[in-house]
Image (spheres, grey):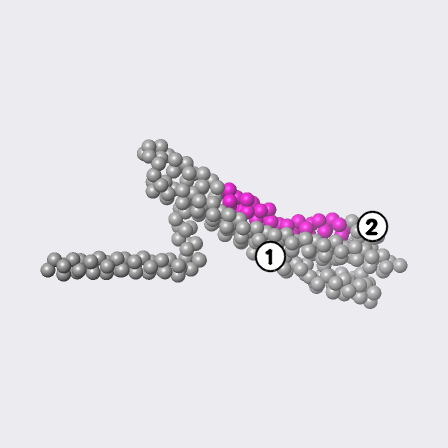
Amino acid sequence: MKKISFTLAAAGMFVMGTTTASAAMLQEEAEASKGFTQVLKEQFIQGGPAFMGIVLLCLILGLAVAIERIIYLNLATTNTAKLKQQVEDALASGGVEAAKEVCRNTKGPVASIFYQGLDRSSEGLESAEKAVVAYGGVQMGQLEKNVSWLSLFIAVAPMLGFMGTVIGMIQAFQKIAAVGNLSASLIAGDIQVALLTTVFGLIVAIILQIFYNYIIAKIDSIVNDMEDASISLIDMLAAHKK
């Protein structure tokens, strides 16, 4: 009888152990099956609403500025070679007024610079060149508008993350000082929150930095087109005056 009872107890312990192991495996599988977005969301919530909310605001505002600039720059991009050919043909066939009409019907900073140069061409090549240079500076300012805000968000996001880390570490050491005992479980939560703020601050900065670099490259490309087109316009006006 005792042998049977011992066998049943052993069987019960084996079943319980198997059930516990199965439950652990199911939990691990559930954790592994979570998507990256779900894990990121949970980690974001664990980071706390104070600094995480500000970091998220930096991301939203930065993306808004980046998207606005990308749309504006794409609309400002024109086929410069085609525009130069059209202006040159208009100058040859209909004179300055025909060339100005071509510029009016074309969007973008290059067409605007062409129009200003053509408008001042009656005062001489020097006046036309000064108008092109001056209006080119105005157009560059329009292209770079709000880009400084994007660089600000890139700098602020990781700084806020580091600040959250420092505050979390201070709270952890305060708990240690109050209790008088160094326990990993006592400070693990504060340290986790502190590190999460840094991670999300860096993630925001990396995302915005990618957009920032694209925008700067786009601006440089448009500015190069503007400078090349300005030189071509002066040459065309000089040839037309002959």
The residue sitting at 61% across, 55% down in the picture is 214
Whether residue 140 sits left or right of residue 26 in the image: it is right
> How many marks are shown on the rendered structure?
2
The kind of secondary structure element at disc 1 is helix
Q: Nearer the viewer, residue 127 or 152?
A: 152
Rendered image quadrant of residue 10: bottom left
Q: Position of residue 9 (x, y in %)?
A: 17, 58
Which residue is disc 1 drawn over? 70
Range of magenta residues: 131-160
Q: Residue furthest front?
A: 3
Whether residue 135 sits left or right of residue 174 in the image: it is right
Question: Principal SS element in the magenta part?
Answer: helix
The residue sitting at 89% across, 59% down in the picture is 242
Question: Can residue 156 be seen in this snapshot?
Answer: yes
**Residue type of the residue flagged with mark 1:** Ile
- Give the crowd class for mark 2: few <14, some 14-19, many >=20 residues within 10 Å: few
Spatial CA distance of label 1 from label 2 is 35 Å
Q: Nearer the viewer, residue 176 or 241?
A: 176
Q: Residue furthest left?
A: 1
Q: Position of residue 108 (x, y in %)?
A: 68, 59
Whether residue 2 sits left or right of residue 122 in the image: it is left
Mark 1 or 2, closer to the camera: 1
Q: Nearer the viewer, residue 117 or 189?
A: 189
Q: Nearer the viewer, residue 174 or 209?
A: 174
Q: Position of residue 134 (x, y in %)?
A: 74, 49
**Residue 126 numbered tag:** 2
The residue sitting at 60% across, 46% down in the picture is 148
**Residue 145 numbered tag:** none
The residue sitting at 68% across, 51% down in the picture is 140
